[in-house]
Amino acid sequence: MRLLLFLIPFVLGVYCLVEAISSRDGEVRNLSKVWWILLILFFPFVGSVAWLAAGRPVRTPRRNGPHERSAGEFPEYDRPGRFAAADPAADEAFLKKVRERAEEQRRKAREQKQRELEGDSGEEADPA
């Protein structure tokens, strides 16, 4: 029982101290981040309870920027800062260029394969 009376405030103090250190300066409420850390260090139980009640940043969902996706189809696209196309006409023009380039690459690959086949058949036909 004595161990529990020592362990609960200690764990609470460590948790609040780590949370205070890892929070951003602009999100901490009522006091500056340094004052909260000092309060938790010098008065572990009272400082921890005060941090939880009045200092901890309010956790609200992050708002997306003007060009960020609101919801992606794939999890790798849900990272903050990942930008989405904002202009459908520019997006369509980009996709058109991509398709043209892909078709050009396919055409060149077919021509190269045709030349290789003609080169192989020409060597076989020529008895030397």
Image (tube, rainbow, N blue to C red):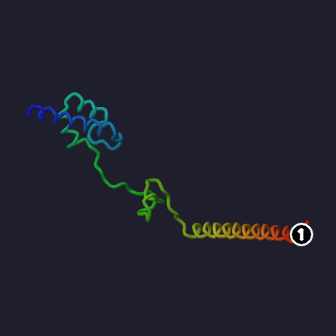
Residue under numbered circle 1? 126
Residue at the location (25% across, 41% down)? 55
* Residue 45 higher or lower than 92, as above or below: above
Q: For this rendering, which residue is in front, 64 or 123?
A: 123
x, y (%) of residue 22?
34, 39
Tell me the quarter of the image containing the C terminus.
bottom right
Residue at the location (55% across, 69% down)? 88
Q: Amino acid at mark 1?
A: Asp
Residue at the location (44% across, 62% down)? 74
Taking the image as shown, residue 71 lies to the left or right of residue 43, namely right
Taking the image as shown, residue 22 lies to the left or right of residue 69, namely left
* Residue 26 higher or lower than 3, as above or below: below
Name which quarter of the figure residue 56 lies in.
Answer: top left
Taking the image as shown, residue 84 lies to the left or right of residue 23, namely right
x, y (%) of residue 100?
67, 70
Outermost residue toward the top in this view? 42
Name which quarter of the figure residue 71 lies in.
Answer: bottom left
Name which quarter of the figure residue 116 lies in.
Answer: bottom right
Tell me the quarter of the image containing the N terminus.
top left
Q: How many marks?
A: 1
Q: For this rendering, which residue is in front, 82 or 114?
A: 114
Circle 1 sits in a helix, a strand or a loop, which is it?
Answer: loop
